[in-house]
Image (cartoon, grey):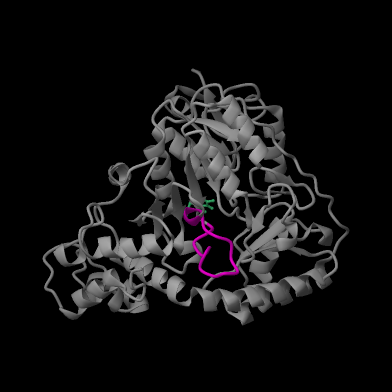
């Protein structure tokens, strides 16, 4: 067991600051507030002094041998893995590195259809061939949950040559799939298990929270410490258990796209966030879970509001539940989640993580206070009183598995023409369309565009969901494969 009270990278950074090193390297602000005055007037001079570049004393992210290596060792141990790699371009870069390390061009990877866009984009980079599994759907709440072992068994039986299985732990709304069975099943069939833990950086840091994927035996996991672990935005970690993928391969893959000027502010924050989670996590999450449970009870006392949680365990695709995800179903109030999301922001100064047609999601994390959590509860109580309308019925439109005509990478590089959405029905898509948040693709490059997809896109547009992915900012037109 290492000394998890240590913060080797952050300590080296503080020493660099105290040493008052005279800089003839980059960054060009040279730690002089005049180098970036307006910025340092607001953020303070210290931020410039700590904004260093790689050097012997601070190590190099591309080939760590000193304090970064030591800090990565502590991170690996904190998450129960053999290795960790600090990331300064978010979990997006970790998801891409996992897929590119485990799956070669033309090889198959099994993944849920609601995988984040970073995974779908990784298919373009890696030239891997997707085999999609439809996630389970909670029809009452209108959300997707985890993946079922039965569907994975079917996908494996039909694609025994697949090299890896990719999944999310937990989902945005907190659902956890049966990881033990999924990992055993995948390993028995010679497939690596790659886990998107963008929303699970806090898992395992309290007895009361579900276990993280690496502790359950996954091969790799990409973890957004910046989302629920307390570190600065963009800072994440990639974790590896040796076996299916070796650490040198991962390092080489990461260095394909990783900056050669990694931010020490981001990496220093990873070091401190890891220490905080290990040393104080039990106490922090005990406190937070107490507040969340109290908040759920109060929210569920409001007629028409359902703050769903662990009682969904046992429903389709929910094997366990991360209680720090406070999902609130609002359709019985007669409003879409999108509307409540806007009302909260515009009238109550409250920003929640995401919304969909029927729900909003508040993420409760290391920095939350009781006061903040109950400001949200009171706002929902107020909204229920002031804005109640007749209930909306949940119209869940589970999309069918897409028909993949060409690989995402071939589609990405093919000739394309632009058509209206209606004219594009039956054509092969050259673009993705995502609803963001929560970042679930409706169509991705290489798939046949169906009437069902176009109808769903139109519905989302009526609900004013942010749709992205097409060159056309209005998403009225889409690129399809072929010449004009
Ligand atoms: C499920 C999921 N995976 C991956 C990512 C990418 O993470 P990051 O923003 O750290 O790059 C996100 C971000 O929202 C996400 O929600």
Q: Is residue 421 above or below residue 371?
A: above
In the rendered image, residue 13, in percent from the top left (x then y), is placed at 24, 72
* Residue 184 falls inside the magenta stretch: no
Q: Going 26% across and 60% down the picture, which residue do you hit?
A: 69
Q: Is residue 398 above or below residue 354?
A: above
Q: Please report the bounds of the magenta region as a residue range.
A: 199-215
Q: Is residue 469 above or below residue 145?
A: above
Res 471 visible? no
Q: Main secondary structure of the magenta part?
A: loop
Quarter location, residue 447: top right
- In which quadrant will I find the N terminus? bottom left
In the rendered image, residue 233, in percent from the top left (x then y), is placed at 43, 63
* Residue 200 falls inside the magenta stretch: yes
Of residues 310 and 259, the one drawn nearer to the viewer in this rendering: 310
Q: Is residue 132 above or below residue 286?
A: above
Q: Going 55% across and 21% down the picture, which residue do you hit?
A: 405
Residue 448 is left or right of residue 16, and the answer is: right
């Amino acid at each position: 067991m290492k000394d998890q009270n240590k913060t080797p990278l952050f300590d080296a950074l503080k020493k660099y600051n105290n040493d008052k090193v005279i800089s003839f390297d980059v960054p060009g602000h040279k730690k002089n507030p005049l180098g970036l005055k307006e910025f340092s007037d607001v953020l303070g001079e210290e931020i410039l002094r700590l904004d260093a570049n790689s050097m012997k004393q601070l190590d190099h992210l591309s080939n760590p041998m000193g304090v970064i290596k030591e800090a990565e060792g502590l991170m690996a141990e904190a998450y129960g893995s053999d290795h960790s790699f600090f990331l300064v371009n978010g979990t997006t870069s970790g998801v891409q590195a996992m897929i590119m390390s485990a799956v070669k061009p033309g090889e198959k990877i099994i993944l849920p259809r609601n995988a984040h866009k970073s995974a779908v984009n990784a298919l373009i980079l890696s030239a891997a061939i997707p085999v999609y599994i439809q996630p389970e759907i909670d029809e009452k709440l209108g959300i997707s949950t985890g993946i079922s072992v039965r569907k994975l068994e079917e996908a494996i039986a039909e694609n025994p040559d697949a090299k890896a299985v990719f999944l999310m732990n937990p989902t945005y709304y907190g659902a956890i799939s049966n990881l033990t069975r999924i990992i055993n099943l995948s390993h028995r069939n010679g497939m690596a298990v790659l886990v998107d833990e963008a929303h699970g950086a806090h898992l395992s840091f309290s007895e009361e929270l579900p276990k993280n994927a690496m502790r359950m035996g996954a091969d790799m996991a990409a973890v957004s410490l910046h989302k629920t672990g307390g570190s600065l935005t963009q800072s994440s970690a990639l974790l590896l258990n040796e076996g299916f993928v070796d650490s040198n391969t991962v390092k080489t893959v990461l260095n394909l796209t990783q900056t050669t000027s990694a931010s020490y502010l981001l990496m220093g924050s990873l070091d401190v966030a890891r220490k905080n989670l290990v040393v104080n996590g039990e106490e922090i999450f005990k406190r937070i879970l107490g507040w969340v449970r109290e908040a759920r009870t109060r929210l569920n006392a409001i007629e028409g509001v359902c703050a769903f949680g662990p009682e969904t365990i046992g429903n389709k695709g929910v094997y366990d539940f991360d209680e720090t995800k406070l999902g609130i179903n609002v359709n019985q109030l007669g409003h879409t989640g999108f509307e409540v999301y806007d009302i909260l922001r515009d009238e109550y100064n409250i920003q929640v993580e995401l919304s969909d047609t029927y729900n909003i999601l508040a993420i409760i994390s290391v920095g939350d206070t009781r006061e903040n959590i109950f400001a949200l509860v009171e706002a929902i109580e107020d909204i229920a009183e002031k804005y109640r309308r007749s209930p909306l019925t949940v119209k869940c439109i589970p999309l069918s598995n897409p028909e993949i005509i060409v690989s995402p990478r071939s589609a990405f590089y093919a000739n394309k023409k632009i058509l209206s959405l209606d004219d594009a029905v039956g054509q092969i898509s050259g673009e993705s369309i995502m609803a963001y948040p929560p970042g679930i693709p409706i169509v991705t490059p290489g798939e046949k565009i169906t009437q069902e997809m176009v109808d769903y896109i139109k519905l989302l547009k009526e609900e004013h969901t942010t749709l992205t992915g097409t060159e056309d900012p209005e998403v009225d037109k889409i690129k399809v494969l072929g010449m004009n």
